[in-house]
Amino acid sequence: MRFSSSSSAPFNAFEAAAQEPKDDEEGEGSSFGRELLAGLKSRPRSISPKFFYDAAGSRLFDAICELPEYYPTRTELSILTRHAGEIAQQIGPDAEIIEFGAGSLRKVRLLLDALKTPRRFVPIDISGEHLEQAAQGLRADYAGLDVQPLVADYTRAFSLPPKPEGSGMRVGFFPGSTLGNFSPAEALSFLQSAARVLRGGGLLLGVDLVKDPARLHAAYNDAQGITARFNLNLLARANAELGANFDLAGFAHTAFYNAPHQRIEMHLVSRSAQTVNLLGESLHFAEAETIHTENSHKFTVEGLRTLAARAGFGIGPVWTDPERLFSVHWLPAAQ
């Protein structure tokens, strides 16, 4: 889970000729303020998971990735470690790597170490402070690599820098099963856009697989309560940035597996009837009413391949762990 838009309408990402004007950083004019108010006035109430990732939320997510219950990160890392050489053969020399929802830049190091003379790395993330810190560390460890962090919401229009002259493939890197945060329509639209932008290159995509619901429940309801803190941080952020008065003790974290939709759902549950003030409006919550904060869809290998083919990608190798908990796909993009 690294974020997506919560809108059910398909979008066309990262294809505009020029970046959209930036929002005000705080207050009603911010994207956070507008979308939060709209989401909480809708029924059912929801908040886009992209807003998890302020500086505090990004740190909490990094902590989630280290939890014993949270298998996706360590499993994907093991797959990348075991098969880095095979992946590098698919990509070839002098590649430009574009990472969507880059976060701490931990996983891309395994890829960069295996690649022959990678030319440029463009990590894209919505959390600017967290991204710049991670990029500085990467520059220090990869002195010959051109690292150009891009602070952007990659579910909205933004421009990529021109491809370096003489470079090899332009390769998208989209780990962490973030594709699962999208609705099915959004996932297809994202992959269609990626197939066009990555022409002649490809997409290295990590997705979580369908499995025992008990294992999924444990992963999203950890014993230390860090996922709960991560979920509740959305309300703390609204208080800090928008002057809201959410009582964090008045909401509880819950996550469950919705089997018919093959997805984990995360919600914040109002513990009692209460009223919250946000941007000059009073929002009334009934006892047990929820705010839907994230979906995390799970895939089968064949289901993902079918989706990728519909989006215009070719079908390349797929790598999984011995338990088939997680999968990493190489999806070539046509010229």
Image (tube, rainbow, N blue to C red):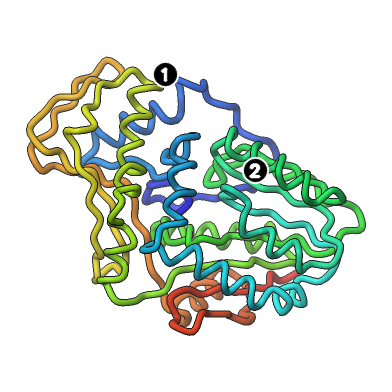
Choose the circle earlier in sequence order: 1 or 2: 1
Q: Estimate the x, y position of residue 331 in percent, counting from the top left.
A: 63, 73
> On screen, 167 above or below 328?
above
Identify the residue under disc 1: 27
Identify residue type, mark 1: Gly
Residue wearing tag 2: 134
Q: Position of residue 319 (x, y in %)?
A: 57, 80
Q: Residue at x 27, y 46 (%)?
A: 292
On screen, 162 above or below 327?
A: above
- Contact check, label 1 and label 2, Cβ < 8 Å: no
SS at badge 1: loop
Q: Residue furthest top?
A: 280
Q: Residues within 10 Å of mark 1 (few under 14, many from 20)?
A: some
Q: Residue at x 26, y 72 (%)?
A: 213
- Residue at horizontal 29%, vertical 21%? 244
10 Å neighbourhood of mark 2: few (<14), some, or many (≥20)?
some
The quarter of the rendered structure image containing the N terminus is bottom left
Q: Nearer the viewer, residue 223 or 146?
A: 223
Amino acid type shown at disc 2: Ala
